[in-house]
Image (tube, rainbow, N blue to C red):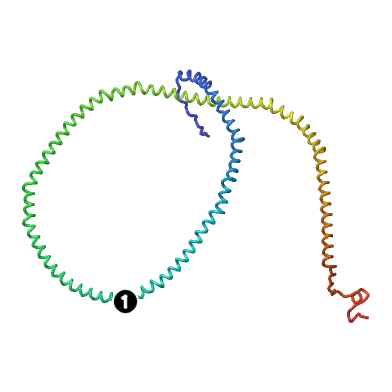
Amino acid sequence: MELDQSTPAKQPSQGCLVVAVRLPVRIAVFVLVLPVRVAWDAAVAAGRFGHDTVLRPAGRALRRLGRALVVQPLVGLWRCAVLPAGRLPARLGRGLARLGQGLARLGHVLVVVPAGWLYRWALTPVGHVLAWAGRGIAWVGRGLGAVLAAVGLGLYAAGAWLGRYLVDVPARRLYAWVLAPVGRAVAWCAKGLVRLVGLVAAGVGFVLYGTLRVLVVLPLLVLWRWVLAPAGRLLAVAAREAGEGLAHAWRVAGRVSRAVGRLLATLARWLLVAPLKWVYLHVLTPVGHVVRDAVRDMVLRPAAEAVRATGRIARQALAAARGTLRQTRADLRRALLGEPRAPERAPRREPTATGARTLERSTTALTKD
């Protein structure tokens, strides 16, 4: 059983000079690119930090400020000014439309109906009379037209005969016996002149082609084959190696920059973050708890108790004042209007105790004593 195995692509053969020059070039390019890559990574990190801590909050603040200063005033202006101002022309337009409808109806009554009556009872009979007169005039015109047509046909036949024998026949004979031979002679001379000019131009072109080929084309071909092509191949190799060296140096510089960044981050975490965290957990937090408890026990709680006592006394005073005011109002009403009458109670529909049903006494007719 045979398995299909993909053969790796063959690398193009490289000369020893290329291999010998590649390593120094890459080292030099790496030395030149490393500071640029480190500065680039630092700029990227600073940009991200600035975007996350400055630009994004500033953008949110500007968005809220713009919404408060621009969008909401514009919305209020639209709702409170533009829409009412638009509704007023709309109502005015509806009023004008109704006025136009009324004027249209009035015009129909005052103009269209009288015009229709005038057309039906005045203009139509006059039109019929004029139509009958026109038909009579047309019959007379047809007779005159037939006479004039006969006269015109006779004149046309006489003119055609005279034109044929006085103009057409002499012109044809002049063309056949004079103009045609002269034209053929002129055409033959022109063809001979064109052939002569073509032969002279071909000879001059052959001479110029040979001269340009020897003086221009062959030197340019030699220059391209033996000078420009080798120089181009050399420059292509140099450019390719420079590009590969720059890309390799950029990648290596990136790795070195990331390693340096991780080292600096580790040192910052060991030298700054860890001590600050220890100080916060073991020093600032206990001190903060002590201060919080002291402030709560010595300041906040007594202040809260005093506020609650003050509120309690104020509520009691307000309740006493309300009771006094209520009693004073009742005394004034009693002094001015007298004692209020007791409300009369409505008679209760429930049976009295003597006539109520109990377990020992029944109210039905069968069990009544």
Percent x, y for residue 205? 21, 29
Look at 55% across and 49% down and name the residue there.
74
- Find residue 340 and report its image quarter: bottom right
Please state which amino acid type lies under the numbered disc 1. Ala
Q: Position of residue 83 (x, y in %)?
A: 54, 55
Question: Residue 307: x and y, percent?
Answer: 81, 45
Q: Is residue 303 above or below residue 271?
A: below
Question: Eyeballing the image, is 54 above or below 114?
Answer: above
User: Quadrant of the rendered structure where residue 230 is?
Assistant: top left
Secondary element at tag 1: helix
Quadrant of the image occupied by residue 337: bottom right
Q: How many marks?
A: 1
Q: Nearer the viewer, residue 114 or 232?
A: 114
Question: Label 1 crowding class (10 Å Cα cut-off): few <14, some 14-19, many 20+?
Answer: few
The residue at 12%/37% (across/down) is 192
Q: Relative to residue 169, is residue 56 drawn left or right?
A: right
Farthest residue toward the front? 336
- 188 vs 73, left or right, is left
Which of the two residues, 229 or 260, is positioned nearer the viewer here?
Answer: 260
At x 26%, y 76%, the residue is: 129
Q: Residue at x 47, y 66 (%)?
A: 98
Q: What residue did someone put label 1 on?
A: 122
Residue 48 image point, x, y percent: 59, 33
Quadrant occupied by the C terminus: bottom right
* Lateral position of residue 300 relative to residue 87, left or right: right
